[in-house]
Structures are given as C-alpha cells and as structure tokens.
Image (spheres, rainbow, N blue to C red):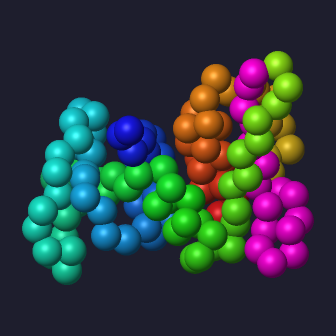
C-alpha cells in the first residue's frame, strides 16, 4: 500500500494557509515529487525571485490532521450506496456542517479523491 500525497494544487494552498509540519516529500511547480531529507528547521521550499517553486507535500491524512488540529475543521468522507464517495466539512467541536454554497454534488470514485477535494474546499474556506 502506498500513501497518497497531496496534489500540487493542494500543496500550494497548504503553504498559503501556513502549513509547516514535517514532511517526507516536496513537490515542485513542474509536478516532480522529491524525497525531503534535510533538517525540517531549514527552509525546504525553494523560491526564485520571491516566488515559491517547491512546496511541502504531505500525505493526505497528515493534511487532514493539520486541518483538524490547527483550523478546527474535519473532512468527513462517506461511502454511498451506488459505489461512490462524498465528503462533508465539519467544524470542531460544534459539528456544524460548512462548505461552499455553490459546490456541485460530485460522486468521487475513490476515498482519496473525495478527501483531496474536501481538503481543497476546506482550505478555500479559511
């Protein structure tokens, strides 16, 4: 089993929202994933002319945990009758259902696709 990493789009959004947890990978603007093995205290994310070109690239579940622990948002993934997955975004601890009002109902083929979409929407909300 391989752990799924966030996409480049999600990695960029995470950086914008302050994500700085320890990761084993980075992802570059050309979508190349590299193993990240320098001390976390050093800057990992390369910049050219003050524009980031490399981003921390956590596994989906680390990004999900970061949202729970730092932003009090939980991404809940549900398997639906009809063989598809959906997500909801809930506040912690009130358990309020939140989300973008114009979000279409999308049927995701995998748990990971639904989680990635939920992460992106949650990041747009903060």
Q: Can residue 53 be seen in this view?
A: no
The span shown in magenta is: 83-98
The residue under the point 31% across, 70% down is 22
In the image, is 14 to the left or to the right of 20? right
The residue under the point 41% across, 52% down is 59
Total marks placed:
0
- Most extreme residue toward the left is 38
| Coordinates of residue 55 in the picture (x, y in percent) | 30, 54
The residue under the point 82% across, 19% down is 82
The residue under the point 19% across, 80% down is 41
| Coordinates of residue 69 in the picture (x, y in percent) | 59, 76
Q: In which quarter of the image is the N terminus?
A: top left
Q: In which quarter of the image is the C terminus?
A: bottom right
| Above or below, 31 relative to 24 | above
Quarter location, residue 40? bottom left
| Above or below, 104 relative to 124 | above
| Coordinates of residue 90 in the picture (x, y in percent) | 79, 61
- Most extreme residue toward the top is 82
Q: Is residue 59 visible?
A: yes
Magenta span: predominant SS is: strand
In the image, is 67 to the left or to the right of 29? right
Quarter location, residue 92? bottom right
| Coordinates of residue 102 in the picture (x, y in percent) | 83, 37
Residue 34 in the magenta stretch? The answer is no
Nearest to the observer: residue 20 or residue 61: 61
In the image, is 27 to the left or to the right of 21? left
């Amino acid at each position: 089993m391989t752990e799924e990493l966030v996409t480049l789009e999600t990695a960029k959004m995470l950086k914008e929202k302050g994500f700085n947890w320890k990761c084993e990978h980075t992802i570059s603007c050309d979508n190349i994933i590299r193993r990240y093995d320098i001390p976390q205290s050093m800057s990992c994310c390369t910049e050219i002319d003050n524009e980031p070109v490399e981003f921390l690239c956590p596994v989906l579940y680390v990004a999900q945990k970061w949202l729970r622990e730092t932003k009090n948002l939980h991404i809940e993934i549900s398997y639906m009758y009809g063989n598809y997955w959906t997500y909801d975004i809930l506040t912690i601890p009130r358990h309020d259902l939140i989300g973008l009002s114009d979000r279409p109902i999308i049927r995701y083929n995998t748990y990971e696709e639904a989680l990635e979409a939920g992460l992106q929407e949650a990041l747009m909300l903060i």
